[in-house]
Amino acid sequence: MKIYNHIDQFEKVSNAVITLGTFDGVHLGHKVIIERLKKIAGDVNGQVVVLTFFPHPRMVLFPDDHGIQLLNTINERTMLMEKAGIDHLIIHPFSKEFSRMSSTEFVRDILVNKLGVKKLIIGYDHHFGRNREGSFTDLEELAPVYNFTVERIHEQLVNDVAVSSTKIRNSLLAGDVATAREFLGYDYELTGTVVHGKKLGHSLGFPTANLHIHEDYKLVPANGVYAARTLVHGQWYDGVMSIGNRPTFDNGARSIEVNLFDFNADIYGEKITICMTEFIRSEQKFENSAMLIEAMNADKLAAIKLLS
């Protein structure tokens, strides 16, 4: 897969089969679109081109109050696109100037003149251009004018529920990582750097790696205890992950911590990835450390069972 950090870096390819959008999560619905692109590209001896944007438009248009929580960092999105098997990924920097482009200008100047679109595939609810004014109807009208064809993918269903990034976010914010996995097609991940914490887990007999996520727009699921697998130095370790404010102790700043089973190494400053597998319980305040330790032992047993 070739990656471009600006539309101007892309050189036209023959029979470009294109889709565009945020693709947050690169979930099962997105993958249906991508598989359709790959099928068409194969039929016409073309190449698959995905146009996405970063930063997210809301981060640019409302910098002080965007409230955005994304399922993927841009690096995660890139890796998922590569796994999906596309040929070209264009990550165009979204700007206020870009946001003022009309839907017709976008089709003419970007899709046709810059990218050389021959076939455009979009999701069922896709809008584009200034104030999201462009719709599938507009594309149907413009396609014959600029000599390309357009196709819309309808809602894809998982367990009779339409897949959407919003529904995945809502599942994660409720701690329901199992439902999120059904929609995503993979375990939800958090990647960051191991930093020093308050060493409370170590004092209780459950040393933890404290995770700092550099991207403040990355969605962190609901507070609670989860069974998780963690990638450290290329090797996976089972463990128990906790998200919360340590109510038994200080009810302090929110933290992300993971206790790795059968692991004893200094990984401060190292990059790790935590895959959240199952929800075990909500965050609780215990009367004393002994009761907390009892609960943590139960959490470990539950995680071992779930991860087996």
Image (cartoon, rainbow, N blue to C red):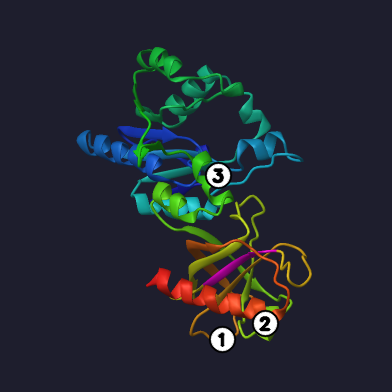
Q: What element carries label 1?
A: loop
Query: Is 3 in front, or is 125?
Result: 125
Q: Is residue 154 left or right of residue 70?
A: left
Q: Do the residues labelled 3 and 2 touch (CB within 8 Å)?
A: no
Q: Distance between the residues labelled 3 and 1?
A: 36 Å
Q: Is residue 84 magenta?
A: no
The residue nearer to you, when weighing 209 against 114, is 209
Q: In this view, does 117 lie above or below 276?
A: above
Marks 3 and 2 sit apart, C-alpha to C-alpha, by 34 Å
Per the picture, the main secondary structure of the magenta-coloured stretch is: strand
Q: Quadrant of the C terminus?
A: bottom left
Lower sequence index among marks 3 and 2: 3
Mark 3 or mark 1: name the one nearer the start of the chain.
3
Residue 41 visible in the snapshot: yes
- Of the image marks 2 and 1, the number of the one nearer the N terminus: 1
Q: How crowded is mark 1: few (under 14 residues within 10 Å), some or many (20 or more)?
A: few
| Spot occupied by residue 57 in the image (x, y as percentages of width and height) | 62, 36
**For the point 58% across and 55% down, which residue is it?**
221
Give the crowd class for mark 2: few <14, some 14-19, many >=20 residues within 10 Å.
few
Q: Depth-wise, is mark 3 or mark 2 nearer the camera? A: 2
Image point 49% across, 28% down: which residue? Answer: 110
* Amino acid carrying mark 2 in the image: Ala
Q: Where is residue 156 in the image (x, y as percent from the top left)?
A: 36, 35
Q: Which of marks 3 and 1 is in front?
A: 3
Pick the front one: 259 or 160: 160
Residue 170's disc is: 3
Instruction: Say if mark 2 contacts mark 1, CB within 8 Å.
Output: no
Q: Residue 290 carries which label?
A: 2
- Where does the magenta region start and end? 240-244
Write down the residue under mark 1. 265
Secondary structure of the residue carrying tag 3 is helix
